[in-house]
Image (cartoon, helix red, strand yellow):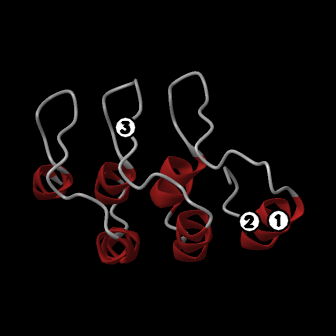
Amino acid sequence: ARKSDETALKTILEADDNRDVNAVDSDGRTALLFVAGLGSEPCVKLLAEAGANLDHQDNSGGLSALHMAAGYVRPGVAKLLLELGADPEITDDRGKTALDLAREL
């Protein structure tokens, strides 16, 4: 997911029924947060279809996938996340929504 490789991600998701699509790294970031920041709409969709928590927040600022998409100027990913049901009202540790972050850019 960190490389935003749709084919590899699809292979991994299809190969392991016991996978945890919400597994986190040491900063509490999931694969969805990484691919949202990288701007990979296909990978976001794959992870969402596999059950990824769209509203998960990391423990390094309280950022969600929507925050990542906004902060890295990925409007297509932000739109997709909203269409999939991500909560636009979630605030980060500074009390900012993803829209607030987008306005700051």
Q: Tell us which disc is closer to us: 2 or 3.
A: 3
The residue at 74%/65% (across/down) is 5
The residue at 55%/42% (across/down) is 30
Which residue was labeled with disc 1?
8
Which residue was labeled with disc 3?
57
First in sequence: mark 2 vs mark 3: 2
First in sequence: mark 1 vs mark 3: 1
Query: Which quadrant does the C terminus fall into?
Result: bottom left
Element type at mark 2: loop
**Coordinates of residue 54 in the picture (x, y in percent):** 41, 56
Given contact means CB atoms under 8 Å apart, are the residues at marks 1 and 3 in contact? no
Quarter location, residue 25: top right
What's under tag 3, amino acid-wise? Answer: Gln
Query: Which quadrant does the N terminus fall into?
Result: bottom right
Which residue was labeled with disc 2?
5
**Coordinates of residue 96 in the picture (x, y in percent):** 13, 41
Quarter location, residue 20: top right
What's under tag 1, amino acid-wise? Answer: Ala
Given contact means CB atoms under 8 Å apart, are the residues at marks 2 and 3 in contact? no
Distance from disc 2 to disc 1, alpha carbons, whole Å, reads 5 Å
The residue at 76%/48% (across/down) is 19
Given contact means CB atoms under 8 Å apart, are the residues at marks 2 and 1 in contact? yes
Distance from disc 2 to disc 3, alpha carbons, whole Å, reads 23 Å
What's under tag 2, amino acid-wise? Answer: Asp
Q: Is residue 48 left or right of residue 105?
A: right
Vertical relation: 103 (above or below) 49: above
Looking at this view, name the residue that lies furthest to the front. Answer: 18
Vertical relation: 94 (above or below) 97: above
Q: Tell us which disc is closer to us: 1 or 3.
A: 3
The residue at 79%/48% (across/down) is 18
